[in-house]
Amino acid sequence: MLYKVRAEISLKPGHSDPEGETTTRSLKELTYPVRNIGVSKMYTITLEAKSRSDAETKVDEMCKRLLANPTKDNYTIQVEQTQ
Amino acid sequence: MKREEIRIFILRVGGTNCDEETKRAFRDSRMDAEVGHFNQLVKEKNLLDYDALVIPGGFSHGDYVRAGAIWAKQIMAKLGKEVKTFVDEERPILGICNGFQVLIEAGLLPQFDGISNFPEAALGANIPAGYNCRWIHLTNESNGRCVFTRRIRKGSIIRIPIAHSEGRFMFSKECERKYLERLLDNDQLVFRYCQHDGKYPDGRYPSNPNGSFYDIAGICDPSGTILGLMPHPERAYYGWQLPDWTKNDKIPAFGDGRIIFESVAEYLTKKF
């Protein structure tokens, strides 16, 4: 089966997020009442897997091995079946 | 082994830098150094024909995903077996700046329980945010385990430049104290950022340029043969590279970075 999986990688709370801080400042300058912005990265992965849980397991491993650094990143995984 | 017989391989891929400066530093310390593309090492050469490996600075593979992450996984996927043998035989590996990030992401540092499949530490975005390219001071913290600093007296202050925006060394919050103790117990802490008088800045900018935990600038593995550091020793090899050389009446022949190359030369000549 072909699955589309979204893996969102975000910084753990308390970690420096210069892009988020700079974007917050810029939006404040545009007079929006923004308190804080956290920037995350979304990977949309299309992969072959035996089942939904197999797809999730595979992407979980990808996150642990490459897409996220467990020292500073959190991640969430959402699976969609495409075929 | 004579110095002239020591063979150093300096890896490069798209985005790396200072490979030629590093080659010149090794050659001027009378070792045989060459620069080669990673694919060349995989397809045409044998890592085990070399006595030491250098992963230089830069922005390998565009720093995509995270600084050093892509190259680290590529190295372990394509050369993992050779790297493991290299490490087991205690042949030195030096990771400078982006090379340090690669060693962390590859699980080759800190290696508390052998080579790790997952990074055990991280080099995160600087605090304060931004790219810092300037000279900083470091103290040598090694008690003698690290083969790259054996000729530097413990506690000595050396001056070497940094150039990075992601150099904030950190462990996960929940393991921070435990891992620091392991670094200290194993003599794996090699360099800490310091003020010009040697005092530790306790995380404070500008002496600590990136907010690194415990002012950490460089660590080694438990064997002492793998060193990763954010500063660039190859940019401090000669006296004429120093920032204040025009102010002094007499220009020193060498900068503080040279002793790192000399130390590893001494290790290799004695060990092999």
Image: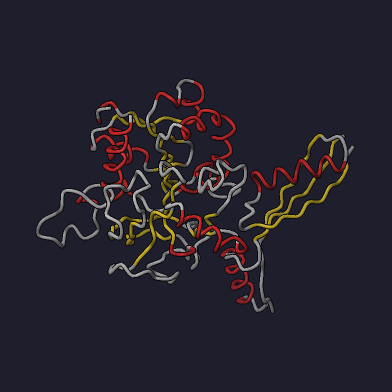
Q: Is residue B63 left or right of residue B20?
A: right
- Residue B171 at what x, y percent from top left? 56, 58
Q: Position of residue A71 (x, y in %)?
A: 61, 56
Q: Between residue B67 and residue B146, name the one nearer to us.
A: B146
Q: Quadrant of the N terminus of chain A?
A: top right
Q: Report the side of B46 relative to B265 (left or right).
A: right
Relative image position of residue B35 (x, y in whole percent): 38, 32
- What residue is at 50 percent from the left and 56 percent from the top? B166
Residue at horizontal 56 percent and vertical 60 percent from the top: B178
Q: Residue at x 62, y 42 (%)?
A: B117
Task: Give residue B122's position: percent from left, percent from top.
Answer: 55, 54
Residue lying farthest front?
A: B185
Is A19 or B140 nearer to us in this picture?
B140
Q: Is B126 left, or right, of A32 in this rendering?
A: left
Q: Return the residue nearer the eye: B107 or A19.
A: B107
Task: Give the residue at x 46% y 63%.
Answer: B210
B100 to B53, vertically: above or below = below
Residue B266 against residue B40 in the figure, above or below? below
The part of the image, by quadrant, that contains residue B172 is: bottom right
User: Residue B99 falls in which quadrant of the image?
Assistant: top left
Q: Which part of the image, by quadrant, shows the C terminus of chain A?
A: top right
Along the line of sight, which residue is nearer the eye, B29 or B38?
A: B29
- Say how many tags the image has: 0
**Furthest residue in direction top, as rendered:** B44
Query: In this rendering, is residue B172 above or below B149?
Result: below
